[in-house]
Amino acid sequence: MAKKKFKDLREVLSKIEKQFKDEVGFLFKVKGDIVSIKYSQFVKDVKSLGEYFLSLGLKNNRIAFISPNRYEWEVTYMATACSDLICVPLDRSLPEIEFKTLLIRSDAEVLIYDKKYSEYVDKFKEDENVHVKHYICMDTDFVGVLEKGYELFLNKNNKFNRVRINNDKMRFMLFTSGTTQAAKCVMLTHKNLCQQLYGISFLYPITKDDIYLSFLPLHHTFECSTGFLYGISVGAKRAYCEGLRHFVDNIKDFNVTCFVSVPALMEGVYKTIMKNVEKNKKMMQLKVALKASEALKKIGIDVRTKLFKDVHERIGENLRFVICGGAPFNPEVCKALNDLGIVVYQGYGLTETSPVICAEYGGHTRLGSVGRPLEGIRVKIDNPNEDGIGEIITKSDSVMLGYYDDKEETKKVLKNGWLHTGDLGKIDSDGYLYITGRKKDVIILKNGKNVFPDELEMLVNELPGVAECIVYGAPQEDGDINLHCKIVYNKNEIKEKVGDKQGEALREYYWNLIKTSINKKMPTYKYIKNVTITEEPLIKTTTNKVKRHEEIAKILGNK
């Protein structure tokens, strides 16, 4: 059967109502007990809230919302979108000043919020620069608002049923990571998101029997499109994670079958697995099992879940696969997880592309690659060098309209319908894309050689006790650049390896490791020439990405 592309998110809601209304759609915990909500209730709540919004007579039609991942966030998103109003999902980690600034920049008239932000909201209500007219707390006002909206919806002349979506207009305002001044506002449409759902539908055989774990922040397009919107479009259940420390337990408690993740989390899962193997002195046993598994796979027999039963019991026996993206993923760690039967598919994209551009899926993987373009998406390498590496550019109905109120920045990235991503990569003869780094992060040496810091950072991060690191170019008196590395170490983890080494002794330990286990594998121009160590985390955005240029400026400024 040919796959159908949705015209807008109202069609998604209609499909849910027709096909999945009797199915459980949402799972969460209340005082330790699992509570469920059916899709029929979700549809009713979306229509009720939408009707309430439409009764407010909004001028700018912009509704902002902020909260941890929860049912009310998803109702708010769909109610706003299906009412042809403008969604402004805000980063749940925003500090007060950025929260206020983005509210002002978005010109939102309604703010839906979790009670944890009540202190901020009380200040906003007294601030004449904030133009929000209607404040709705998810914990104290939401139920009452739904009741009012449902009364209005029951009127045969209700406004919600008469809404018609223009799927080419800006209906989603997404602020990217960065400082308040630098944060760009990406303008997306219903067409953008529906193209994304169409492309994803060719990749993963997800059904109403699957259970997604909602873990990554919902304001992030990766979780929102791939987890939330695609999940509800196929009737899958959504289970809300209680927090990072409950992550593994929630996978088991909710019988999770799949989720969207980032490399840092999956690398952490792998480190924990290997730590337990070492602790229980089963490393030799594991190596033997891996060799046996690999031999059997070559003749079409997959016994990974049985051979590595202890691992699967620890992280959830029903887990089918993980979709991973948002940052570079060490290919060796990815392979190691897959060898253990924890199936991880990599993907690549940007907020500006709704977000997924390329992805791996069953039978279509290649070590070190982020997969091939989704259905309906074109990808090219612009101005490739002799190694085939150049800027990744893409064209599709998933590409944004532009940056809100910023024509100059829009012109820099949108050229003749092609989005210039700012990422560097290459495409092999079978169409698989390989990311080599950010265009603006490349370190250019005096001899003209290019060094991609991601490549070296991936290797340094494998060293014992390394929590994170940054490789940067340090200018020299002769005008050349030396590669230096700053390591943030985990005090407890490194102590298990080297005892009480501190200060210069610990720095020498890492320096010797870099010289012997990293530099020796590299051509001389990629040698790291110096290392510094610290316990202080690197400067990051609210979505936990390193602010590379700010961190480097801080390092060099302190010299």
Image (cartoon, rainbow, N blue to C red):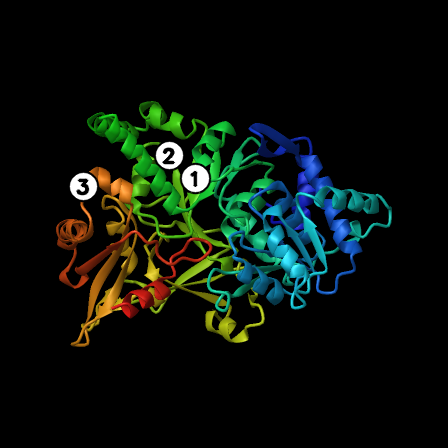
Q: Quadrant of residue 27?
A: top right
Q: Mark 1, residues whose alpha carbon is within 10 Å: few (<14), some, or many (≥20)? A: some
The answer for how far apart the CA atoms under marks 1 and 3 are is 34 Å
Question: Which residue is the site of mark 2?
Answer: 342
In the drawing, what numbered circle is on residue 498? 3
Residue shown at 27% from the left, 29% from the top: 277
Whole-percent x, y for residue 413 in the image: 47, 69
The answer for how far apart the CA atoms under marks 2 and 1 are is 8 Å
Q: Are marks 2 and 1 in contact (CB under 8 Å)?
A: yes
Along the line of sight, which residue is nearer the eye, 465 or 152?
465
Query: Type of residue at label 3?
Result: Val
Residue shown at 77% from the left, 50% from the top: 51
Whole-percent x, y for residue 243 in the image: 49, 39
Query: Type of residue at label 2?
Result: Ile
Numbered disc 3: secondary structure? helix
Numbered disc 1: secondary structure? strand
Q: Earlier in the sequence, mark 1 or mark 3?
A: 1
Residue shown at 51% from the left, 53% from the top: 93
Question: Which residue is the site of mark 1?
Answer: 322
Whole-percent x, y for residue 313 in the image: 39, 25
Q: Quadrant of residue 174?
A: bottom right
The quarter of the rendered structure image containing the C terminus is bottom left
